[in-house]
Image (spheres, rainbow, N blue to C red):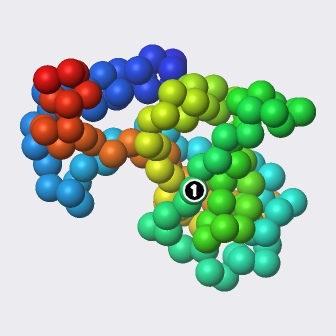
């Protein structure tokens, strides 16, 4: 299943009649990706502070001259890198539509070649039953 098809399916679940969940469980993982460009931005300086579970911000850069689907990843206002170009199209489309996607660090460690590596998840909050009704015009 393509990432775009998977995202469309997950978003359909968000808008549909999914069973109610507690707030702590109310996220759907949209994708998991390594962070691209890690060594070029603030991540090397912040490396000791980056821990699994830390929340990240996603910011669209539609005017990026290298990638029209660019999504900047920030931690506490500092730029860490980007979602990889090969993985950003479906997420970019959803952000452009106003879907409230979030991100978090899943893993921060060293790659086999010694380079720092941060693996992140992009997640979509699951709407509560009342919110789903309002989204569907009810």
Instruction: Kindly indicate the quadrant of the structure image that contains residue 96.
Output: top right
Up the image or down, 39 lies above or below 132; here it is below
**Residue 121 in the image: x percent, y percent?**
49, 49
- Residue at the outermost left position: 19
Q: Would you say residue 30 is visible in this rendering?
A: yes
Judged left or right of residue 23, residue 86 is right
**Rendering coords of residue 6 (x, y %):** 42, 23
Q: Split into 4 quadrants, where in the image is the N terminus?
A: top left
Q: Taking 48 as reference, is 138 left or right? A: left
**Residue located beneath label 1 in the image:** 57
50 to 129, vertically: above or below: below
Rendered-image quadrant of the C terminus: top left
Q: In which quarter of the image is residue 67?
A: top right
How crowded pointer 1 is (Cα within 10 Å; few <14, some 14-19, many 20+) is rated as: some
Q: Is residue 51 left or right of residue 28?
A: right
Q: Nearer the viewer, residue 127 or 46?
A: 127
* Image position of 42 with respect to 85: above or below: below
Whether residue 112 can be seen here: no
Residue name at image x 54 percent, y 74 percent? 51
The structure residue drawn at horizontal position 14% and vertical position 48%, both measured from the top left corner, is: 21
Residue 20: % across, % down: 10, 43
The structure residue drawn at horizontal position 50% and vertical position 58%, both measured from the top left corner, is 104
- Asked which secondary structure carries label 1, the reply is strand
Residue 59 percent location from the top left of the image = 64, 47
Point 54% across, 35% down: residue: 95
């Amino acid at each position: 299943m393509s990432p775009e098809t998977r995202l469309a399916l997950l978003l359909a679940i968000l808008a549909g009649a999914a069973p109610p969940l507690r707030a702590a469980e109310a996220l759907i993982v949209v994708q998991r990706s390594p962070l691209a460009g890690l060594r070029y931005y603030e991540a090397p300086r912040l490396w000791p502070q980056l821990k699994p579970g830390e929340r990240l911000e996603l910011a669209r850069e539609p005017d990026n001259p290298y990638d029209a689907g660019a999504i900047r990843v920030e931690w506490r206002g500092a730029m860490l890198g980007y979602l990889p170009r090969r993985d950003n199209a479906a997420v970019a489309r959803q952000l452009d539509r106003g879907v409230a996607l979030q991100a978090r660090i899943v893993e921060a460690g060293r790659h086999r070649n010694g380079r720092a590596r941060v693996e992140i998840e992009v997640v979509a909050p699951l709407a509560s039953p009342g919110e789903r009704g309002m989204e569907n015009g009810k």
